[in-house]
């Protein structure tokens, strides 16, 4: 394997620079996705953390660009930007019908955007945390496979100003600024605005334009921190995001030259507010109130035949449009120990956290499908779900080195669904999850852990008159995961990172499948979710940083994954015993980072993954691929200039694949594999100014 060769070359290079000759200061990695801010090594689960320095090193714009750097995290190229994620092979791959039911949680500044995660532009971010494995106790039914937690920078105690301008090929243009600081001794703020545009790396040769797959993305945020006295702390975050992207990424010859006559759109306008109130008036406990509101308008439209009548030489014209509005309001109340306080259980130091969580999610969908400009399917639906959860967590210090933790969450969901076909569902479920863990200190800077966790995901229903009656309803899924690992720093802090081993068992595994009912109609697909009896996911993940010298550092991320479906019968294809979809067996990223005292800096990065199955509805795979990224720059005083290249060698690779009939000139209407390509070579210049 190529990545193993690179790994061993890196190892040899590391030792050739006398890895163990100098001591480096230890950098604490604080994770905010936990109930309390904790060091990563003290949390008994696999966590990948990317801080603001690492984001700047990579020279990237959107969370999509970061996905290749994080082992066992994948996304489905079903949309212009990632909305659907897979962690350890578990997660959704395409637009859902009926009810939102994500397997991977996506939290941005404390606000739940699970299933609609396009908002993660990266300017002025503080940290991204990926928690792998079930996170039921923390985030409930939306975090069966894990959680992505994105945090932007907080208001600072001194006035700060940051700006960024960017130019690149494919008509890339970006401009952003962030500033803020104290208003007085009790009040501070931070304001951020960023605009990004490019043409989307496609040329529509039928319309003779280059921007039908455009990215037109505006992000703004305001954060306010107010401390009226020593007992109260208010943190308010307001987010406004307008992603007005095109969607013209598919063509029958799987190239970058499209021929659609009615290109689609993939837009998301989100308004969201988060208010966190902390009361610190007690000597031992802190009371927190977390209130959220979000409102997202989403349009997904596309030219379903991917062509035009002149190309097809016949009347073959299909289009789809979905307008979606999601509103949610949530309230969470926590009681947790104050930092530095100490309580006891059975005469041993312990920490206890209890909380209540409520969320009401309302979603309306209007889906219209057209043939030659006339609608032939028109579905209006409304979904209303209320979730109430209670959770508790206890950490008991057994002795000076060993901590035993338990956590538990029980969740009640009441939902209502109705549409204009007179279909009504009123599902009601009670779910529970949690786990136990041991964390043992093996040295001042390193821990080992063992955890057994249970996650859950709500059941649901399939809509549409064509869905077989015995597949209208599917059951909830449970995930049991056993995990062990080591985290910390070694050899005088020259080597730091983590190694995790896990094995997970999926019970009543939910499998999303599809069928094309009429080969003459590319929109005659029915999408439905069914339950497999069992599934298994097991593997290894490692994240390491090596300080080779004062100026050179190497970061290495590698994962191995083995997945399997058990006892599942698809109506047209057998997938029992097969790997799960979008679950490559190997992923890696290796980066060489150089920072010289004279101001020059650079990063050379290698990343790649092995082949993977595109879907559960067929047995076709992607090709394996390896990519190279490069960034070179110079920094002096308050200015920074950098040249960057993503996919330097212009490799072609696929991020999504479908297998169906879409050629009216084929008399047999035989299905074919169609793939969406990832972005080709992208080069540009970035200028930063800050003080």
Image: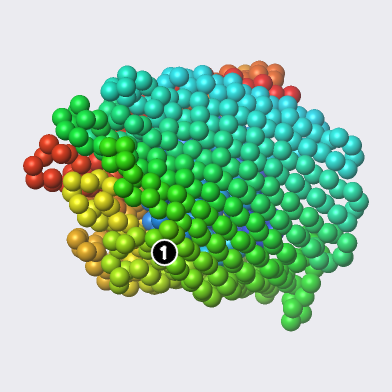
Horizontal side of 304 relative to 74 (left or right) equals left
Looking at the image, can residue 675 be seen? no
> Based on the displayed image, in which of its 4 quarters is residue 33 positioned?
bottom right
Q: Is residue 48 above or below residue 685?
A: below
**What colour-coding does the image apply?**
rainbow
At horizontal 80% and vertical 57% (from top left) the residue drawn is 278
Q: Return the residue nearer the eye: 459 or 300.
A: 300
Horizontal side of 20 relative to 472 (left or right) equals right
At horizontal 66% and vertical 24% (from top left) the residue drawn is 163
- Which image quarter holds the N terminus? top left
Tell me how many marks there are: 1
Q: Return the residue nearer the eye: 634 or 86.
A: 86
Furthest toward the left, the residue is 667
Q: Is residue 199 above or below residue 480?
A: above
Q: Is residue 116 above or below residue 303?
A: below
Horizontal side of 275 relative to 77 (left or right) equals right
Whole-percent x, y for residue 480 in the image: 45, 71
Q: Pointer 1: what residue?
A: 422
Whole-percent x, y for residue 431 in the image: 53, 74
Looking at the image, can residue 687 be seen? yes
At horizontal 77% and vertical 32% (from top left) the residue drawn is 180
Looking at the rendered structure, the secondary structure element under dot 1 is loop
Q: Residues within 10 Å of mark 1 (few under 14, many from 20)?
A: few
């Amino acid at each position: 394997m190529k990545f193993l060769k690179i790994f061993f070359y890196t190892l040899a290079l590391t030792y050739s620079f006398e890895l163990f000759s100098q001591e480096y200061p230890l950098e604490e990695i604080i994770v905010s996705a936990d109930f309390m801010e904790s060091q990563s090594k003290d949390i008994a689960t696999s966590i990948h953390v990317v801080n603001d320095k690492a984001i700047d090193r990579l020279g990237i714009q959107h969370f999509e660009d970061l996905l290749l750097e994080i082992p066992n995290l994948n996304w489905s190229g079903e949309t212009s930007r990632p909305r659907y994620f897979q962690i350890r092979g578990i997660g959704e791959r395409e637009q859902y019908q009926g009810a939102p039911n994500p397997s991977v949680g996506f939290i941005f500044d404390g606000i739940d955007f699970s299933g609609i995660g396009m908002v993660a532009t990266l300017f002025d971010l503080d940290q991204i945390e990926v928690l792998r494995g079930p996170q039921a106790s923390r985030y409930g039914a939306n975090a069966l496979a894990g959680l992505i937690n994105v945090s932007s920078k907080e208001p600072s105690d001194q006035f700060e100003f940051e700006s960024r301008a960017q130019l690149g090929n494919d008509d890339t243009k970006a401009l952003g600024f962030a500033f803020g600081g104290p208003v007085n001794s009790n009040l501070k703020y931070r304001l951020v605005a960023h605009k990004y545009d490019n043409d989307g790396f496609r040329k529509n040769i039928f319309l003779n334009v280059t921007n039908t797959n455009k990215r037109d993305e505006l992000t703004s945020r305001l954060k306010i921190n107010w401390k009226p006295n020593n007992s109260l702390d208010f943190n308010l975050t307001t987010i406004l995001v307008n992603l007005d992207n095109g969607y013209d990424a598919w063509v029958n010859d799987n190239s970058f030259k499209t021929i659609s006559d009615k290109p689609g759109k993939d837009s998301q306008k989100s308004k969201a507010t988060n208010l966190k109130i902390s009361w610190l008036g007690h000597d031992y406990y802190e009371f927190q109130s977390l209130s959220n509101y979000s409102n997202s308008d989403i349009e997904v439209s596309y030219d379903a035949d991917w062509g035009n009548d002149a190309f097809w030489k016949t009347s073959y014209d299909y289009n789809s449009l979905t307008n979606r509005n999601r509103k949610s309001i949530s309230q969470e109340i926590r009681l947790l120990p104050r930092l530095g306080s100490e309580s006891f259980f059975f005469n041993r130091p312990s920490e206890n956290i209890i909380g209540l969580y409520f969320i009401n999610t309302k979603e309306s969908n209007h889906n219209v499908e057209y043939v030659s400009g006339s609608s032939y399917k028109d579905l209006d639906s409304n979904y209303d779900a209320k979730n109430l959860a209670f959770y508790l967590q206890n950490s008991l210090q057994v002795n000076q080195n060993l901590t035993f933790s338990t956590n538990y969450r029980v969740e009640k969901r009441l939902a209502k669904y109705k549409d204009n076909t007179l279909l009504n569902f009123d599902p009601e479920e009670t779910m529970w999850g949690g786990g136990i863990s041991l964390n043992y200190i093996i040295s001042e800077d390193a821990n080992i852990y063992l955890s057994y966790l249970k996650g859950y995901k709500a059941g649901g229903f399939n809509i549409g008159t064509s869905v077989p009656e015995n597949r209208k309803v599917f059951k909830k899924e449970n995930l049991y995961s056993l995990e062990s690992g080591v985290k910390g720093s070694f050899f005088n802090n020259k080597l730091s990172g983590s190694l995790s081993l896990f094995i997970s068992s999926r019970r009543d595994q939910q499998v999303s499948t599809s069928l094309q009912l009429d080969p003459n109609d590319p929109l005659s697909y029915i999408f439905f979710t069914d339950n497999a009896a069992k599934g298994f996911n097991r593997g290894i993940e490692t994240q390491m940083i090596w300080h080779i010298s004062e100026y050179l550092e190497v970061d290495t991320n590698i994962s191995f994954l083995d997945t399997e479906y058990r006892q599942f019968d698809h109506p047209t294809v057998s997938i029992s015993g097969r790997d799960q979809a979008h679950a490559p067996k190997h992923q890696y990223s290796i980066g060489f980072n150089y920072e010289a005292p004279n101001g020059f800096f650079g990063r050379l990065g290698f990343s790649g993954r092995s082949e993977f199955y595109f879907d559960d509805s067929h047995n076709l795979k992607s090709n394996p691929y390896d990519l190279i990224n490069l960034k070179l720059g110079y920094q002096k005083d308050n200015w920074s200039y950098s040249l960057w290249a993503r996919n330097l060698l212009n490799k072609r690779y696929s991020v999504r694949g479908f297998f169906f009939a879409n050629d009216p000139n084929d008399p047999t209407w035989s299905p074919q594999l169609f793939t969406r390509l990832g972005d080709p070579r992208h080069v540009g210049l970035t200028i930063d100014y800050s003080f």
